[in-house]
């Protein structure tokens, strides 16, 4: 078979890589592709939204199957154009792709078929939209109806932000026609996950759960991007949650679309918010996610082309998906400045080292190839993806590979997969008594990060906001925190107050912030009354506090115990290398 993949990102590189492995395939083409893809497939310089030229090429080249990566050609109706010409193509029809192309269509479908989603209202008049927002209050989410390059969803924390968002979309028309109508919906909290299935319009095969990371900075801070990393499986999607997703969301959506007269063929992606085991739909997408495709397809053992063929031919019921039980993680390496403006054309070094690592694949998202070298050519540049025996193994292998690759201005998040690690019992709370304590205590956070231990840092003072401290201590366990580190200076009662209200281990870091240089903090932390135990490290000993917390967690976490051993070995090696 000759196969054409449409698109130019990391998702398409992964699709090409997977399709190339099929025994059914003789040749792979990609339009327009990228530098990395050009090593596996013949790249054809046709844009993904140039439907007519794509169909002409497929006819001329005698392509047997076309696979569409991005949403734009699907929403523009590429499947209809191809089918009209009798060409085989994987993806939903223009009508079915409305599930992503129009938020109004998706919400109305969900309402009609009782699919759990945020409460909402639809507006085409900005004044009525503003009245509704005034009535509902904030936080609230404003969504442009049509495709807006991933920027059409504005979660508004305040009423002002919500009103501004309505003006932006409906009056200033920053997204053009896509903003003629808007959806205003209830702000949902919980933990997000992605759930993808393939369907031939009737039969459904579920892929494992996954999760992406939209914001640019660690701890989900900063503006949204196309996605800075992903992992699979997402532990928040337990067997029970998966049952809910299939029963309450996927089946009703596929059946509902068929009933409406738009049978859905292709990948249906449900973006979910999960709270107390109950999933609600945030959005539907009509294609593989990018970067979710990278970890998902790395885990797929079945011949992908057999599945794609079965979808196109409508006989998916005879197929099954074989999935590698090992978790996988993709870390996206981006150009400095992304998602804002960034420079291109930087030479990429160290790719060969990463590529030669076992269980690692480097998928190219935005690269070009010239004279034997790869150069950056986009905001998201690479998706370094690893399989591991456990999730922590996959994370550390992915980051080991990432560290071997470099270019001028490279940026990547350091906490991909950390939310999943919390579910595995890795979570440390750091409490600081004052903003001036942050600088020293960041050493604890950085040490924990090096060991792939998620943590959260909270400001609460034993003297100025004691209720806040007590509340934190009382609720830490139910949040999944396993150890609390408290950093405070002066007469530091912070650790003691926390220890009085929790049975979690508490480690105090006395800080040298007073005229007594931390001696006051040391004595007031160490000399606790009987029954209120606090472990105390040395003055400013934030790093040791983190290591002690890690050692406590490692009692029930073999990969962490191994990582700690390695860290100690590295420290010993450093000492051996010092020449006196
Ligand atoms: P969407 O394109 O609808 O998935 O929205 C993009 C992102 O906005 C999601 O991944 C969520 O993080 C956030 N989001 C969308 N809808 C809501 C909602 N109703 N409540 C809270 N966050 C939301």
Image (cartoon, helix red, strand yellow):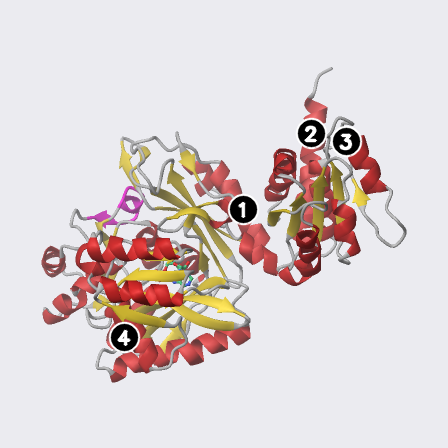
The C terminus is located in which quarter?
top right
Say if 349 sits above or below 62 in the image. above
The residue carrying pointer 4 sits among few (fewer than 14), some (14 to 19) or many (20 or more) residues within 10 Å by Cα, namely many
Q: Whole-Å distance between the Cαs marked 1 and 2?
A: 21 Å
Say which of 109 and 251 sits in front. Answer: 109
Which residue is located at x 87 percent, y 54 percent? Answer: 531
Would you say 416 lies left or right of 52 here? right
Q: Identify which residue is drawn at 55% across, 58% down.
A: 420
Give the label, 1 or 3, closer to the camera. 3
Who comes first in sequence, dot 1 or dot 2? 1
- Earlier residue among tags 3 and 4: 4
Q: Which residue is mark 1?
A: 397
What's drawn in magenta, residue-wise? Answer: 34-43
User: Which circle marks residue 518 in the picture?
Assistant: 3
**Position of residue 65 measured from the top left corner of the image (x, y, whole percent):** 22, 64
Res. 349 image quadrant = top left
**56 with respect to 425 (left or right):** left
Can residue 553 be seen in the rendering of this structure?
yes
Q: Which residue is mark 4?
A: 264
Q: Earlier in the sequence, mark 1 or mark 4?
A: 4
């Amino acid at each position: 078979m000759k196969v054409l993949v449409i698109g130019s990102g990391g998702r398409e590189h992964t699709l090409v890589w997977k399709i190339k492995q099929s025994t059914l395939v003789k040749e792979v083409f990609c339009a327009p592709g990228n530098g990395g893809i050009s090593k596996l497939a013949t790249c054809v310089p046709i844009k993904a939204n140039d439907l007519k030229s794509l169909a002409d090429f497929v006819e001329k080249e005698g392509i047997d199957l076309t696979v569409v990566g991005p949403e734009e050609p699907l929403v523009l109706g590429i499947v209809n154009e191809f089918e009209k010409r009798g060409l085989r193509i994987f993806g939903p029809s223009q009508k079915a792709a409305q599930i992503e192309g129009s938020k109004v269509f998706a919400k109305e479908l969900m309402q009609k078929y009782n699919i759990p989603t945020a409460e909402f209202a639809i507006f085409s008049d900005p004044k009525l939209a503003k009245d509704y927002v005034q009535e509902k209050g904030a936080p609230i989410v404003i969504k442009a109806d049509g495709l807006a390059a991933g920027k059409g969803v504005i979660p508004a924390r305040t009423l002002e932000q919500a009103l501004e968002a309505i003006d932006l979309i409906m009056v200033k028309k920053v997204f053009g026609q896509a903003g003629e109508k808007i959806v205003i919906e209830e702000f949902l909290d919980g933990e997000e996950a992605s759930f993808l299935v393939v369907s031939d319009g009737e039969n459904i095969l579920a892929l494992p759960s996954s999760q992406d990371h939209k914001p640019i900075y660690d701890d989900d801070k900063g503006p949204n991007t196309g996605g800075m990393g992903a992992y699979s499986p997402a532990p928040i999607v337990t067997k029970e949650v998966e049952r809910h997703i299939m029963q309450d969301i996927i089946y009703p959506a596929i059946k509902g679309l068929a009933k409406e007269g738009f049978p859905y063929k292709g990948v249906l992606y449900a973006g979910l918010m999960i709270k107390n085991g109950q999933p609600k739909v945030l959005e539907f997408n009509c294609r593989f996610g990018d970067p979710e495709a990278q970890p998902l397809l790395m885990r797929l053992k079945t011949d992908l082309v057999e599945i794609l063929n079965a979808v196109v031919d409508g006989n998916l019921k005879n197929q099954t998906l074989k999935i590698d039980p090992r978790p996988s993680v993709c870390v996206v390496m981006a150009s400095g400045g992304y998602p804002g403006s960034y420079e291109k054309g930087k030479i990429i070094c160290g790719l060969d080292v990463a590529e030669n690592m076992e269980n690692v694949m480097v998928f190219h998202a935005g690269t070009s190839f010239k004279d034997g070298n790869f150069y950056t050519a986009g905001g998201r540049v690479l998706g370094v993806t690893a399989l591991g025996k456990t999730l922590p193994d996959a994370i550390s292998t992915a980051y080991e590979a990432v560290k071997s690759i470099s270019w001028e201005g490279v940026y990547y998040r350091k906490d991909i997969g950390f939310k999943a690690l919390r579910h595995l019992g890795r979570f440390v709370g750091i409490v600081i008594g004052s903003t001036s304590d942050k600088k020293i205590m960041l050493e604890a956070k950085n040490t924990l990060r090096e060991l792939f231990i998620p943590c959260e840092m909270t400001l609460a003072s034993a003297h100025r906001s004691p209720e806040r401290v007590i509340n934190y201590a009382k609720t830490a366990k139910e949040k999944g925190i396993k150890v609390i580190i408290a950093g405070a200076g002066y007469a530091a009662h912070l650790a003691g107050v926390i220890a009085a209200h929790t049975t979690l281990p508490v480690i105090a870091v006395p800080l040298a912030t007073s005229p007594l240089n931390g001696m006051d903090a040391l004595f007031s932390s160490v000399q606790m009354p009987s029954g209120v135990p606090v472990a105390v490290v040395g003055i400013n000993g934030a790093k040791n506090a983190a290591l002690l917390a890690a050692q406590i967690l490692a009692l029930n976490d073999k990969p962490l115990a191994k990582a700690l051993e390695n860290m100690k070995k590295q420290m010993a090696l450093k000492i051996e290398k010092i020449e006196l």
